[in-house]
Image (cartoon, rainbow, N blue to C red):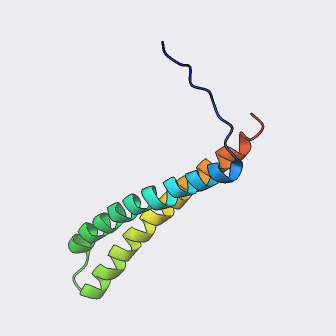
Amino acid sequence: MTSIPVKEKVSSDKRVYSVMQKGLIERGTLFLGVGVAAGALASVVLARGSTSRKVITAFGGGVGLGSAWTRTNLELEEMLNSKGD
């Protein structure tokens, strides 16, 4: 016999914590790595000096982290807007 899963009520602070953990730790790490890799590849093509290569690589990492934060922020807003459901 199979059991029907019961939907538990999860407190809002646990939901926020799980969204933040998924967004900033998991997705942030992934997007930072992708941004740094893309920035490093672009810096090899676009720049000659080591300082400019570092700047372009850091910019790629910043874009990656910014993208992760934007997605996390959208998920938090969506969660807060669906609070009444």
In the picture, measured across the screen, residue 10 lies left or right of residue 43, that is right
Q: Is residue 43 above or below residue 79?
A: below
Taking the view exactly as shown, the residue that stands out farthest to the right is: 84
Give the quarter of the image for residue 61: bottom left
Give me the residue at 44% from left, 56% from top: 27
In front here: 41 or 18?
18
Image quadrant in which the C terminus is located: top right
**Residue under the point 42% across and 63% down:** 64
Comparing 82 with 5, the one in front is: 5
Q: Position of residue 71 (x, y in %)?
A: 53, 53
Location of residue 24 in the rendering, given as x and y in whole percent from the top left corner: 50, 60
Q: Is residue 70 left or right of residue 52?
A: right
Across and down, in percent, residue 34 comes to 33, 61
Q: Position of residue 31 (x, y in %)?
A: 40, 59
Which residue: 60% across, 56% down?
17
Looking at the image, residue 80 sits to the left or right of residue 72; the answer is right
Number of marks present in the image shown? 0
Quarter where residue 70 is shown? bottom right
Name the residue nearer the viewer: 13 or 78. 13
What's the residue at 21%, 82% (across, down)? Answer: 48
Up the image or down, 4 lies above or below 68; here it is above
Front-most of 30 and 8?
8
Left or right of 46 in this view: 56: right
> Height in image: 62 above or below 76?
below
Q: Residue furthest top?
A: 1
